[in-house]
Image: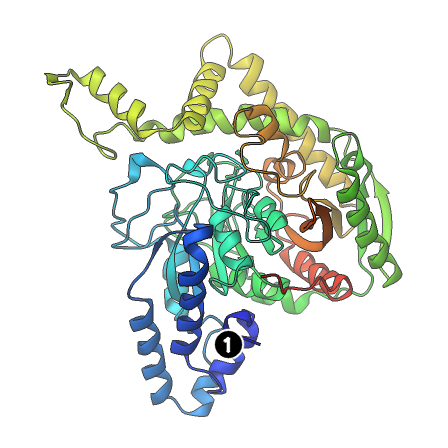
């Protein structure tokens, strides 16, 4: 086994036992990056000081006795990749956009402060669809990322760079962001675990905005245990983010949770038209295995499930049109005072900065959102979509009266080929059909590798989505860890 194959839990254990140094782990990941990333393009930038940081951790370790080493936080010395929309002080954070190509973050996002406090090492920032809009990374202004399982296919998105980096062992874990599936769907496409926390569980201070009522920072890792280690490191209230809930202590909740017989709800609406037959077979097979292992399986109904996607694609663009108004070329973006040798007025200045800075998907959403929010249309679109959102949320609440978690597919298909959907926004949006309802309802959910399907002689991963009630990440991780054991999908890929 190579060092970069280790999980976070295994690497942390070996660091504490002095079996392996932080420098060795970091250089092992960097060697994979040097070998693989020119072809995969998971990273937009690899930080050149990662090795020096690693040496600092090793110096700290050398000064500690065994008891001190045992008390080290779980992410001490662990090399991580960070999605390009999360601010790291002094680093560029471009959100995959030309608009922020030259933007340097003036402060650390709260999640970054928390990871730094644990002693994590940052390897680089990862590629993404521009401003997290998309499901394939094809909307990145800096070129797409390739799926490590099949470079002819997309890694999913928008956190495709983070998912590919974890899948190809180019880091031990990563952060992403999930507004409508952007952590779970790429995790499913790349064969890793991707987790989106409850709305309000993790601070978004220092996350470049996209649809503020839907968005959470999530974790990508090789195992459910690792995803949980990362999640517990970033969870918790924050003075800088009023939506981050303060009075919930995840550690305590874990200890209090005992899961003897998992009651798993399987929504019949998630197995209808549009679900790939091979993906369905993998998901049904996984659920059967869980049943044989002692889980109670209940068929449930989420009657408004089919309205989640249209409601999301009204609400998200509306919020995006407001969130992205700040990118006017004055505070962020290129400042051009003349075009074609002619000096321009203020209106032209704004229009020019946004025309040049934003890509087509971002412009499409700003236009859709502005339209849906305009006088006369607000009630018909935005207000209606918010009412649908309530019904979607109530469906889940009713379902959770009978079950601990809900299980179904993460995405309707395995990873698709480049170009297959990029010219047809609606078909791209359909990739989110099973993930967006979770964001509308603010629930925690994750995608767990459940098996593989064959496409063009290549074996492609399929993710099982598990969803839990609000703030029940303990139930989510407990059932995911139990399911992971019996599904035992091999991590080895490249
Ligand atoms: N693919 C979805 C979209 O394009 C989800 C994006 C996200 O979660 N950031 O809106």
Q: Please say which color scheme the image uses.
A: rainbow
Indicate left or right for 172 with 463 as reference.
left
Task: Return the residue nearer the eye: 389 or 317.
Answer: 317
Task: Return the residue nearer the eye: 308 or 276.
Answer: 276
Q: Quadrant of the N terminus?
A: bottom right
Residue 246 seen in the figure = no
Please identify the quarter of the rendering in which residue 288 is found. bottom right
Name the residue beneath numbered marker 1.
12
Local crowd size for mark 1, using a 10 Å CA cut-off: few (<14), some (14–19), many (≥20) = many
Q: Secondary structure at mark 1?
A: helix
At horizontal 75% and vertical 35% (from top left) the residue drawn is 275
Residue 376 x/y as whole percent: 49, 7
Q: Quadrant of the C terminus?
A: bottom right
Task: Return the residue nearer the eye: 197 or 494.
Answer: 494
* Vertical placement of residue 335 versus 451, above or below: above
Residue positioned most to the right: 292
Please identify the quarter of the rendering in which residue 437 is found. top right
At horizontal 31% and vertical 35% (from top left) the residue drawn is 98
Residue 374 seen in the figure = yes
Q: How many marks?
A: 1
Residue 272 x/y as whole percent: 80, 32
Residue positioned most to the bottom: 65
Residue 67 x/y as whole percent: 46, 90
Residue 346 x/y as whole percent: 18, 18
- State yes or no: Cβ of the residue under disc 1 lies below 8 Å from any atom of ligand 1: no
Residue positioned most to the front: 457
């Amino acid at each position: 086994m190579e060092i970069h194959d280790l999980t976070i839990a295994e690497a942390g254990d070996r660091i504490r036992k002095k079996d392996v140094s932080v420098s060795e782990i970091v250089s092992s990941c960097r060697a994979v990056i040097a070998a693989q990333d020119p072809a995969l393009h998971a990273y937009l930038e690899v930080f050149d000081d990662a090795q020096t940081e690693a040496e600092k951790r090793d110096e700290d370790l050398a000064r500690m006795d065994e008891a001190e080493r045992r008390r080290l936080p779980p992410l001490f010395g662990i090399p991580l990749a960070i999605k390009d929309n999360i601010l790291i002080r002094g680093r560029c954070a471009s959100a995959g956009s030309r608009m922020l190509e030259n933007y340097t973050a003036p402060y650390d996002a709260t999640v970054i402060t928390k990871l730094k406090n644990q002693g994590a090492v940052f390897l680089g920032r990862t590629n993404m669809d521009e401003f997290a809009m998309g499901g394939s990374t094809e909307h990145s202004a800096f070129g797409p990322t390739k799926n490590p399982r099949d470079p002819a296919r997309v890694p999913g998105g928008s956190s495709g760079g983070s998912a590919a980096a974890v899948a190809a062992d180019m880091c031990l874990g990563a952060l992403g962001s999930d507004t409508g599936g952007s952590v779970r769907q790429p995790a499913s496409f790349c064969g890793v675990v991707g987790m989106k926390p409850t709305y309000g569980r993790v601070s978004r201070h220092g996350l470049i905005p996209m649809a503020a009522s839907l968005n959470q920072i999530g974790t990508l890792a090789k195992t459910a245990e690792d995803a949980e280690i990362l999640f517990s490191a970033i969870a918790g209230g924050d003075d800088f983010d009023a939506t981050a809930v303060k009075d919930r202590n995840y550690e305590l909740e874990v200890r209090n949770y005992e899961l003897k017989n998992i009651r798993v709800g399987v929504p019949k609406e998630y197995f209808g038209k549009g679900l790939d037959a091979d993906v369905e077979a993998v998901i049904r097979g996984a659920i059967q295995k869980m049943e044989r292992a002692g889980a109670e399986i209940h068929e449930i109904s989420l009657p408004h499930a089919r309205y989640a996607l249209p409601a999301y694609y009204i609400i998200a663009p509306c919020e995006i049109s407001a969130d992205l108004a700040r990118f006017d070329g004055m505070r962020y973006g290129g400042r051009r005072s003349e075009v074609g040798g002619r000096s321009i007025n203020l209106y032209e200045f704004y229009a020019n900065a946004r025309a040049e800075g934003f890509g087509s998907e971002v412009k499409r959403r700003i236009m859709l959102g502005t339209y849906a929010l305009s006088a006369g249309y607000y009630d018909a679109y935005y207000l209606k979509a918010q009412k649908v959102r309530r019904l979607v949320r109530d469906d889940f609440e009713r379902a959770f009266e009978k079950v601990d978690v809900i299980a179904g597919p993460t995405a309707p298909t395995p990873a698709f080929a480049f170009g297959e959907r990029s010219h047809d926004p609606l078909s791209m949006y359909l990739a989110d059909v099973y993930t967006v309802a979770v964001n509308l309802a603010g629930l925690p959910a994750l995608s767990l590798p459940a098996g593989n399907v064959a496409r063009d002689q290549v074996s492609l991963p399929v993710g099982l989505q598990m969803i839990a009630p609000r703030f029940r990440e303990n139930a989510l991780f407990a059932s995911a860890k139990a399911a992971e054991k019996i599904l035992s999908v091999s991590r080895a890929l490249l």
